[in-house]
Amino acid sequence: MHIRLRDCATRTYFLVDTTARSVCADLDERGAVRRADRPDAALAERALASASDYAEYFARAVPGTRTPDGKFLVRGPLTQAERAALQAGGDVPTERPALHLHLDFFDPDLDGRITLGENYRAWRGLGFSRFGAAVKALFSALFFGWPAIEIERIGARRHAGTGIFDRQGAIDEACRAPYLAQFDAAGGELSFGQVLDLLERHSAEGIVSRAQFRSLFAVCKRQNGNRDVITKSQFNGLFDGSLLWQAASTPNSAGRRARWLQPASDAA
């Protein structure tokens, strides 16, 4: 498994390959790592041990989770392009943009392209019916890219939606703040109608953003005992992708998990 980690105590970033037992670290805090950036043996062993334990329990590096020992925050996987760049001696960012972490859920092989089939299977993994998943996959393709969605190119187009993602795919904290303040004022939970009202007041919303939020509502309703509410944690999880992974990992009423949830290939 290739995994981004951030040390909870020191906030140092590590890139770990558990198969090759290779560890790189951003000790200079420059926001990027290359293969030559090796930490000392003790630091490397600490990060490798935590990452290896994580790989025993998780199929992929899920943003927003922690290693089993609680020492590291997981900041997602490395894409195929990033693994190739690291192998070639190039720089790899320590933090992947939040929008890309969100979209990586729909890209199981991490090649940077979300095909129609991948999109469909992801929606099925979130609990949608065959028809519902097909409609959502087609809708996404028509708005964001046909025949495949290019993750690196989607940021500017998404910017016109909620505005919570900026043009680089990072979270615009100023745009997200009014939503979080309302969640706090309501005790951490809002109804679907309240969130849509916030969307109308604070975002340049339109057909796309409303459809995205309605999809979010369906996911949250399943997780919240069929109640039409969304929690602050779920709202935040939408934007870094962790909510989608959590939802796909939740067994359905028959106790089954999504069969599509398989490890991504580590081949560069």
Image (tube, grey):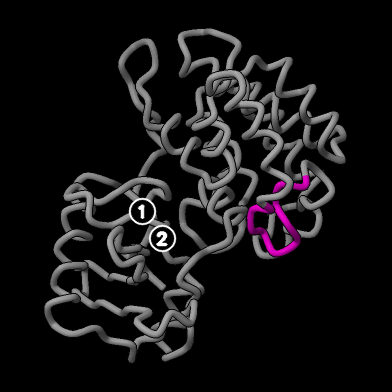
Between 249 and 221, which is closer to the camera in this rendering? 221
Q: What residue would you read off at disc 2? A: 77
Q: Residue furthest top?
A: 226
Examine the rendered structure and indicate whether residue 27 appears above or below residue 46.
below
Q: Is residue 165 left or right of residue 156?
A: left
Evaluate whether residue 129 shows in this view: no
Residue drawn at x 58%, y 50% is: 103
Q: Which mark is residue 125?
A: none
Examine the rendered structure and indicate whether residue 185 appears above or below residue 48.
above
Amino acid bearing label 2: Pro
Q: In x, y percent, where is residue 3?
A: 34, 63
Q: Residue furthest front?
A: 185
Amino acid bearing label 1: Ala
Query: Looking at the image, how many numbered discs can be counted on the residues?
Result: 2
Residue drawn at x 56%, y 48% is: 102
Q: Callout 2 environment at 10 Å: few (<14), some (14 to 19), or many (20+)?
A: many
Between 59 and 142, which is closer to the camera in this rendering? 59
Badge 2 vs badge 1, beta-carbon distance below 8 Å: yes
Give the alpha-carbon distance from disc 2 to disc 1, as whole Å. 5 Å
Q: Which mark is residue 61?
A: 1
